Amino acid sequence: MYKTIVLHVDDGSHFLDRLRIAAALAERHGAHLIGSAVTGSTARDYAMAAATPFGALPLVDLSELRERASAALERFTEEARRLGVASLETRLIEEDAERALVLQSPYADLIVVGQDNVGAIGTSIVSGVPDYVALHGTRPVLVVPHGSQSAAVGNRIVIGWNASAEASRAVLAALPLLRQAGFVRVVVIDPQPLGIRHGEEPGADLATYLARHGIDVEVAVETDGAPDVGDALLAHALRHGADLVVAGAYGHSRFREWVAGGTTRTLLDNAVLPVLLAH
């Protein structure tokens, strides 16, 4: 069960999308929901800017940033109460969102974030909250896409399986959701014919493992030579009415995926349903 859930709170237009999902998860698991907002700047930043030999750099007034973050937390509290969250708290942290969420991750079971929302409090022009937290945090990250209308998540789950350590950690992190799901499908996209990780029948070993946890699993292997594994996985999930994709994050280096693309980058950029990532 997820007993502590940290939700990234900002003043962006898509915040309520992820709050609805976080609130529903908190109710289902009897979890404590923490609304975490950031200023995106610290007193250290101001000191460093003032000390630059080129003269003080123009920065947004820190008090204004605090006011914006405080207002976002007030909105979180009001809406969370309206949604029936029984146990909650708020945190205002003078840091950027990426570092603040990573610092809180060891003391949570799940981190809930949205797709990057440049312009919201605590974000920068070059922002990468979901991938940074998935890569550097110690807990799984649930990424809620913009425009997500449903609070339901985890009723129908598709697992993107490539037998990697990252995918294995993602499955382990998703067990509380997998145990409660009505539909779970393990999807293997273009497994290597001689790959020793998968065994003779790709996905079968994972299905056996999950069955011992009382989880009824289907296995699907796609061998169509998909040009992009992430797109193929998302398409499969949509065809089968999934409301969550579970996948490992950054089996390749983050730099390589930023330059050449990759499954994680595709999932983060193109997802139209929630994605649970673990590294």
Image (spheres, grey):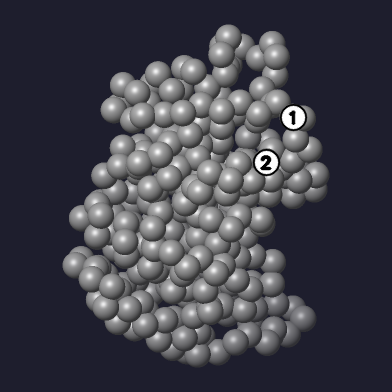
Dot 1, how many residues are within 10 Å of its Cα: few (below 14), some (14-19), or many (20+)? few
Q: Position of residue 95 (x, y in %)?
A: 49, 69
Identify residue for label 2. Answer: 232
**Residue 43 as seen in the image, left or right of residue 50:** left
Q: Which mark is residue 224?
A: 1
Q: Position of residue 45 (x, y in %)?
A: 58, 74
Determine the image quadrant of residue 207: top left
Q: Nearer the viewer, residue 210 or 96?
A: 210
Q: Name the residue at 49% across, 80% down.
A: 11
Q: Nearer the viewer, residue 2 or 270?
A: 270
Q: Nearer the viewer, residue 220 or 32?
A: 220
Split into 4 quadrants, where in the image is the N terminus?
top left
- Above or below, 150 relative to 262: below
Question: Is the residue under label 1 in contact with that under label 2 (CB below 8 Å)?
Answer: yes
Q: Name the residue at 63% across, 85% down.
A: 59
Q: Amino acid at mark 1?
A: Asp
Q: Which mark is residue 116?
A: none
Q: Amino acid at mark 2?
A: Ala
Dot 2, how many residues are within 10 Å of its Cα: few (below 14), some (14-19), or many (20+)? many
- Above or below, 176 relative to 193: below
Q: Nearer the viewer, residue 74 or 83?
A: 83
